[in-house]
Amino acid sequence: MAEVLKLLQREHGHIAKVLNVLERQLRHFDQGHTPDYDIIDSVLAYCLDFPEFCHHPKEDLIFRRLRERDVTLPLAARDLPGEHQELKALTWKFSAAVNRILQGAEMPRQWFTLLGRDFVTSYRNHIAMEERIFFPAALESLSEQDWAEIDAQVTDRQDPLFGDRLTERFAALYADIQSQDQDFAPATQPRS
């Protein structure tokens, strides 16, 4: 398998762990408790930054190569860049709601829960589509030369949560993931 696909699948696993944290916070909120809004805010900051600037550009390289080869993708994968933009917009919408709450605004509990669940479901469905449809179509359609060229173009930015150095911004999120996931490998100490 191409190195970039292995990396993308590993990143999908990381994103899933972040979504698990958000789901736990939403369940807590749904039960009438106050969630940890700082952790929710960190989840959303991660989902705004990492996919946009590190993860999706790798997928876009594969998508463009498939388009260059005039590969007809299955219907569900034909607008991958559009789906990435929809996820970004949904993330911004949910982030804005969290920021309003952090600034003291009141909003209906049910609306907030539904927005959060929509965010998680949309992300999980998108990842599932890529794993079941997009990646297999790419593996079937692209040559070893295509993969070598894609791998050579990949520039990997340090993951602020799952990389070698944990940034301070994500320390509480990291601790939450680590407390829930026995297989989570410790990173080095947080940095400012």
Image: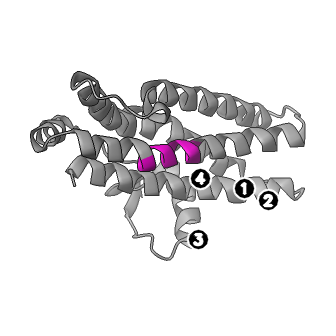
Mark 3 or mark 1, earlier in chain: 1
Say which element carries label 1: helix
User: Does the rendering let one see residue 29?
Assistant: yes
In which quadrant will I find the N terminus? bottom left
What is the x, y in percent for residue 177? 55, 64
Q: Residues within 10 Å of mark 4 (few under 14, many from 20)?
A: many
* Residue at image mark 1: 25
* Residue at image mark 4: 19
What is the x, y in percent for residue 168? 47, 51
- The answer to whether the residues at label 1 and label 4 have Cβ atoms under 8 Å apart is no
Mark 1 → mark 4, Cα distance in angstroms:
10 Å
Q: Which mark is residue 180?
A: 3
Q: Name the kind of residue labelled 4 in the image.
A: Leu
Q: Nearer the viewer, residue 62 or 180?
A: 62
Q: Name the kind of residue labelled 2 in the image.
A: His
Mark 2 → mark 4, Cα distance in angstroms:
14 Å
Mark 3 → mark 2, Cα distance in angstroms:
15 Å
Q: Nearer the viewer, residue 174 or 66?
A: 66
- The answer to whether the residues at label 3 and label 1 have Cβ atoms under 8 Å apart is no
Q: Residues within 10 Å of mark 2 (few under 14, many from 20)?
A: some
* Residue at image mark 2: 28
Q: Name the kind of residue labelled 1 in the image.
A: Gln
Is 160 in the magenta? no
Mark 3 or mark 2, earlier in chain: 2
Mark 1 or mark 4, earlier in chain: 4
